[in-house]
Amino acid sequence: MEMGFSLAINYQSHPSILNMRDSDHQYDVAIVGGGLAGLSLSILLAKAGYQVACYEKEKYPFHKVCGEYISFESWNFLEELGIPLSDLNLPSINQLMISAPNGKYLEQELPLGGFGISRYTLDSALAKIATKCGASIFEQNKVVDIAKEQTTFAIKNAAGTSFAKVVCGSFGKRSNLDVRWKRAFIEKKNDKLNNYIGVKYHIKTDFPNNAIALHNFKNGYCGISKIEENKYCLCYLTTAENLRNNSNSIENMEKNVLCKNSFLKKIFDSSTFLFPNPITISQISFENKKQVENNILFVGDAAGMITPLCGNGMSMALHGAKIAFRSIDNFLQNKVNRDEMERNYTREWKMTFSNRLRTGRIIQSFFGNEFLSNMLISSIKPFPKLVSGLIRQTHGGAF
């Protein structure tokens, strides 16, 4: 069920930079993928007066594999986009619990905290705002290829071919275009950074409204936190090997692996599951990615993905959209050339996020290992300042 709320749109526009031959098929910017980063970027560009097309292969609203916890660093930005967060009575989350497979756990106050909202609700609301701002949002429209023709890109999609001066890839963790273009992280052999699966449910359960928990199990971890409408998001990441070892059955894996953690067993045994089937994604990679390839700017998970246990992927996607907007805006106003736009975007993205990604990979190396996660929980529990420091390393300030 969607949340109902009115969205007041106020923005100052200026004439489009691109001399358009066909207003239906030629744009200043084309964005492939209508998730948080793509929709936020669409709104920013449309508010600035540019002609924007955003292509999304699904139809809003729809569910995505996501922990659905957003750091408070994104609160002001989302409200500036037009989401009335202060009016939505969303859960405020300020407590963290982490458990090890052996049942030991620690509890910690979150230094910044965050709030919960489902992607089903948030993405749909952002798509409506983008449309009201003047962006063209093409739902159920899969882009199959992008080709650069001198200073213009041709975007081949389900409805035909469109053209744009700038193209951004915002198609998430892994797409058909990543495979088609043989991006480096796709070509890597399966290892501890690039062969994960994600599983998500919405549930009704007995759990504190103000807490987020991270429960570890063999080769994986599962998060739970409250979202809107008295529901909770239950989302976990594990290896493809775990699934194979349980006859490729998610149910068997949850029973035989996840529920070895007593906290997870209680959740799975006592909760009401609201989806007929889980939402899943496979072949998740945390390898380093390039932020620009073939003159295409990547945003969100397509540019780089922080490990979910850090709880900051949604904020990174939103912040990345703001960084991309600044670079694109300067280019379309002829303040910089294309090479300068690409270098500026890459440099600012790395300055903002590289340390977070690096810290996340280090932390994941502990929590993805049964023995190490048991040892780590026992070792750091007496040192709450150390835990707070690790959390701060994976988060930023308001943007």
Image (spheres, grey):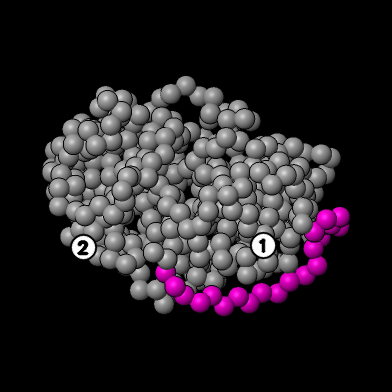
Residue 151 lies in magenta, yes or no?
Answer: no
Quadrant containing the N terminus in the rendered view:
bottom left
- Whole-percent x, y for residue 140 in the image: 58, 49
**What residue is pinned by disc 1?**
135
Give the answer, above or below, for where 130 lies relative to 381. Answer: below
Are the residues tagged 2 and 1 within 8 Å (C-beta)? no
Specify the principal SS of the magenta part.
loop
Q: At 27% from the left edge and 25% from the top edge, which residue is drawn?
A: 247
**What residue is pinned by disc 2?**
208
**Bounds of the magenta span?**
3-23
Tag 1 secondary structure: loop
- Whole-percent x, y for residue 177 in the image: 61, 35
Tag 2: amino acid: Pro
- In-front residue for pair 221/19: 19
Which residue reaches farthest top? 189
Tag 1: amino acid: Ala
Question: Quarter of the image holding residue 208?
Answer: bottom left
- In-front residue for pair 63/109: 63
Residue 344 in view: no
Q: Residues within 10 Å of mark 1 (few under 14, many from 20)?
A: many
Q: At 53% from the left edge and 30% from the top edge, which residue is drawn?
A: 185
Residue 12 lies in magenta, yes or no?
Answer: yes
